[in-house]
Image (cartoon, rainbow, N blue to C red):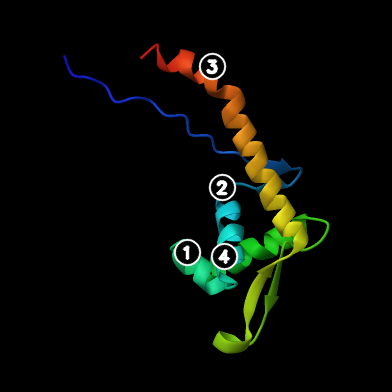
């Protein structure tokens, strides 16, 4: 009899507004990478995403929240850059907290479900 590998719970949390997704795993990763690199182009490169796609996502995030989540500074390699705003840092922190709480609160139910395999 072939032994099955254990199952894992993988949650994909999306925060949606009236016009569609506001924040989810992709925007979360992009925002976290911008926070860590201070560069939109480097964050995009690490996600294997075009700069234009990353820029479009940042514009969408900045438009959907009451204040921008990311500040972009023009100027090329030496003078330009990107910074996560205090609101962006708070959105990231709260999103991560919601995701962690979702995993905690569903652990027992998932364990029961996994035993049915």
Residue identifier under label 4: 36
Q: Residue at x 54, y 16 (%)?
A: 109
Q: Residue at x 60, y 72 (%)?
A: 38
Please give the residue where the numbered disc 1 appears in the rendered image.
Answer: 49
- Left or right of 15 in this view: 39: left
Task: Compare marks 1 and 4 and give the one earlier in the sequence.
Answer: 4
Give me the C-alpha separation between circle 2 and circle 4.
16 Å
Which of the 4 quarters of the picture holds residue 54? Answer: bottom right
Element type where label 1 sits in the image: loop
Which x, y percent locates residue 93? 68, 49
Which badge, 3 or 4, is on the more N-terminal residue? 4
Q: Relative to residue 48, is residue 92 depicted above or below?
A: above
From where the camera sits, is residue 11 visible?
Answer: yes
Q: Nearer the viewer, mark 1 or mark 4?
A: 4
Tag 1 and tag 4, C-beta contact below 8 Å: no
Quick check: 66 above or below 113? below
Q: CA distance from mark 1 to mark 2?
A: 14 Å
Assess disc 1: are there few (<14), some (14-19) or many (≥20) residues with their C-alpha within 10 Å of its C-alpha. some
Secondary structure beneath dot 4 equals helix
Label disc, if present, on residue 78 of the rendered structure: none
Comes first in the chain, label 3 or label 2: 2
- Mark closer to the chain start, 3 or 1: 1
Do we see residue 50 in this rendering? no
Query: Counting residues from the N terminus, which is met first, the one under dot 1 or under dot 2?
Result: 2
Q: Position of residue 59 (x, y in %)?
A: 69, 65
Within-10-Å neighbours for mark 3: few <14, some 14–19, many 20+:
few
The quadrant in which the C terminus is found is top left
Badge number at residue 109: 3
Q: Which residue carries the number 2 mark?
A: 25
Tell how many labels: 4
Badge nearest the viewer, 3 or 1:
3
- The alpha-carbon separation of the residues under discs 3 and 2 comes to 23 Å
């Amino acid at each position: 009899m072939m032994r099955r590998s254990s199952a894992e719970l993988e949650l994909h949390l999306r925060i949606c507004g009236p016009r569609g997704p506001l924040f989810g795993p992709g925007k979360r990763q992009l925002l976290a990478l911008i926070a860590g690199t201070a560069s939109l182009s480097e964050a995009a490169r690490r996600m294997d995403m075009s700069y234009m796609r990353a820029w479009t996502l940042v514009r969408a995030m900045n438009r959907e929240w009451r204040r921008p989540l990311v500040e972009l500074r023009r100027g090329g390699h030496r003078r330009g850059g990107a910074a996560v705003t205090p609101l962006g840092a708070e959105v990231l922190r709260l999103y991560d907290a919601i995701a962690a709480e979702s995993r905690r609160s569903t652990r027992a139910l998932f364990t029961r479900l996994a035993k049915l395999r």
